[in-house]
Image (tube, rainbow, N blue to C red):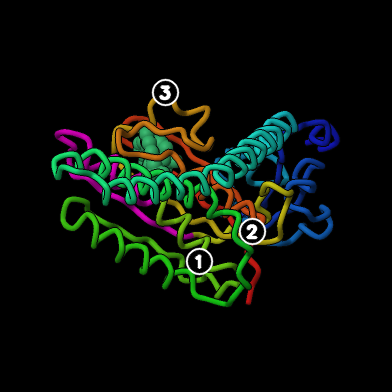
Amino acid sequence: MDTSGLDLLCTAVLLLDESHHIRYANGAAEELLGQSRRQLAGQPAQPWLDGCESVLKTPLQGQSWAWLIEIPVHQGGHLDDLRQARGTQAAQRETLRNLAHEVRNPLAGLRAAAQLLEMELPRDDLREYTQVIVAEADRLAGLVSRLSSSNQPASTPSVFNVHELCEHVLALIRLEFGERVRLERDYDASVPEMRADRDPLLQALLNVMRNGAQALVETPDQASPTLQLSTRILHQPMLADGQHRMGLRIAVVDNGPGVSEALRHKLFHPLVTGRAQGTGLGLSLAQEYLQGQGGLLEFDTVPGRTEFRLLLPLDVA
Ligand SMILES: Nc1ncnc2c1ncn2[C@@H]1O[C@H](COP(=O)(O)OP(=O)(O)OP(=O)(O)O)[C@@H](O)[C@H]1O
Ligand SMILES: [Mg+2]
């Protein structure tokens, strides 16, 4: 087989021997895996393939190689779209933060004035109205403070075990949803301790898990509501700011109805919600927290299976 034509392909191609060691890599594979074909030659293929979402494996008959592996590569257009979407989302968040900043002071004034007015009221039954003003001002103040929350200075990165963080989030979900949602975990024991900003990561995972649990409990007649949490190491992941040597994937899968068609293309925009009580900030903040750490939040959804993936560069401690 002449391998020169393989270099013209956008798809990454590896040729393996009987023992699944790499014998050849085309140009797209070199670029995707971040190593030259000379460096790749002789290495076992599996660790490289573990982090790939979809891999096509074809047996070769009567050739010097036993297997041909194809790994679809993210197209340039897709990355451009991703960058553009990030820019738009960042601009929206900035506008909303400015708005939140402007609203904060008048809101406090409004609340204080309602309380003063309450003290002057001649009749008790009129208090109901001032109490509505105070309660609604408090609700707005909560929204304003969530809108501004991502503006806080980054805390210092610390070294921690990501599975302890996962367990912490699972405990919070169990507290809130109890027996209504079955929780399953599937951890990759080889994930090393990581160095990152722990609190924003915890908050991002909690936001995603709460959404999954809410989708399950809010669906009438949902059969065996289950939320699965898994971790995996990624080799050479392509993240928002380019390719990294190693990464971590935390995946949250629910068997609920899926994200409605109308929301899918704008799910990460702030204030986009499909729930009556939702503020539509959970995913926007989660995306912002992850991007702040060089990571990415992505999702796939079909009725019966929705997966959110938190992808992070793995800065080994
Ligand atoms: N796992 C899921 N299954 C189905 N729909 C989902 C899922 N996750 C998110 N969604 C949809 O995405 C919307 C946006 O989620 P997001 O977390 O940003 O805001 P929210 O949950 O509405 O409000 P909050 O600010 O309280 O989190 C949700 O309202 C819901 O309609
Ligand atoms: Mg939410």
The magenta stretch spans residue 214: yes
> Residue tagged by mark 3?
261
Residue 97 on image: x %, y %: 59, 44
Towards the viewer: 271 or 138: 138
Give, as a single range, the part of the protein colored magenta: 209-231
> Residue tagged by mark 2?
293
Q: Is residue 42 left or right of residue 175?
A: right
Q: Are marks 3 and 2 in contact (CB under 8 Å)?
A: no
Q: Which label number is shown at residue 61?
A: none
Near mark 1 (Cα within 10 A), the count class, few <14, some 14-19 or many ≥20, is some
Towards the viewer: 105 or 1: 105
Q: What element does badge 1 sit on?
A: helix
Q: Amino acid at mark 2?
A: Gln
Query: Residue visible at 37% across and 51% down?
Result: 209
Quick one: label 1 or label 2, which is nearer the N terminus? 1
Alpha carbon distance from label 3 to label 2: 29 Å
Query: Residue visible at 52% across and 27% down?
Result: 265
Kindly tell me whether mark 3's CB lies below 8 Å from ligand 1: no
> Residue tagged by mark 1?
199
